[in-house]
Image: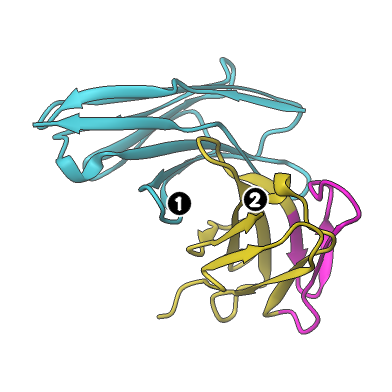
């Protein structure tokens, strides 16, 4: 079956612009996670959804970052007023339930110039 | 908070065995995961330990000691395609998020 998909695969934007990153989880997976990975580092947790609600958003670095999952499936990570430090690979993962194995998507590579 | 340590880089020879260690200090523990990540690709699940002991899955095995805050991933009969980064991650007890180490880059040479 289809895995986790993310679009776009690459995004280049200018400092100060707004970007949206999309994640399509595996069908039927109730839990969805966003992580951010910088070069040479492990993924860093941003936010976790159980269904439509954000169960844990403690990893969002500041109020420029926001994520939604309005119908409990597709999620969008939104970044306002992008900064060069936001450049990273943004990974999405989903799991059947909150306690089960997480499957990762291929990521969106964001470059802020 | 949580702190996870693993070596930055390791090298090994094709056909050999390599052990990648991971130590962790956590305020809550709900399982330890190992993921493999090839350059430019998504992490893929390798193994999961929540109880002490050894879990074996083909050429890969993972060990956990909760009292020592220690895990290792054992890779046998190394192949060139095993060259990748190996990520150790601890699952948070409250909200199920994964906290990752920085990863160990393994280079397998002929």
Per the rendered image, the range of residues in magenta is A47-72
Relative placement, left or right, of A55 versus A91 is right
Image coordinates for residue B46, horizontal then vertical, percent: 39, 47
Residue that protrudes farthest toward the bottom in the picture: A71
Q: Colour of chain B?
A: cyan
The image quadrant of residue B10 is: top left
Q: Which residue is mark 1?
A: B43
Q: Secondary structure at mark 2?
A: loop
Up/down of A44 relative to A3, above or below: above
Up/down of A78 relative to A82, above or below: below
Query: How many circles with numbers are drawn on the protein?
Result: 2
Image coordinates for residue B12, horizontal then vertical, percent: 20, 24
Q: Is residue B2 magenta?
A: no
* Residue A98, visible in the rendered structure: no
* Residue A29, visible in the rendered structure: yes
Image coordinates for residue B91, horizontal then vertical, percent: 64, 42
Relative placement, left or right, of B97 versus B79 is right
Q: Which residue is mark 2?
A: A87
Kindly identify the residue that appears in the image at 59 percent across and 66 percent down.
A11
Q: Secondary structure at mark 1?
A: loop
Is the C-beta separation of discs 2 and 1 under 8 Å? no
């Amino acid at each position: 079956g289809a895995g986790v998909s993310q679009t776009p695969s690459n995004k280049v934007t200018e400092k100060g612009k707004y970007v949206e990153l999309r994640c399509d989880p595996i069908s039927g997976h109730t839990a969805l996670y966003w992580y951010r990975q910088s070069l040479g580092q492990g993924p860093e947790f941003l936010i976790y959804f159980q269904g439509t609600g954000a169960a844990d958003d403690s990893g969002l670095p500041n109020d420029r970052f926001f994520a939604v999952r309005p119908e409990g499936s597709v999620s969008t990570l939104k970044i306002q007023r992008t900064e060069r430090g936001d450049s990273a690979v943004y990974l999405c993962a989903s799991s059947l339930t909150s306690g089960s194995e997480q499957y990762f998507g291929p990521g969106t590579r964001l470059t802020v110039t | 908070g949580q702190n996870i340590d693993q070596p930055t880089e390791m090298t090994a020879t094709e056909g050999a065995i390599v052990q990648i260690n991971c130590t962790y200090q956590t305020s809550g523990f709900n399982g330890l995961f190992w993921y493999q990540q090839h350059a430019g690709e998504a992490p893929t699940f390798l193994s999961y330990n929540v109880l002490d002991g050894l879990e074996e899955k083909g050429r890969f095995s993972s060990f956990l000691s909760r009292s020592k805050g220690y895990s290792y991933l054992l890779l046998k009969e190394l192949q060139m395609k095993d060259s990748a980064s190996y990520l150790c991650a601890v699952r948070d007890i409250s909200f199920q998020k994964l906290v990752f180490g920085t990863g160990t880059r393994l280079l397998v040479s002929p």
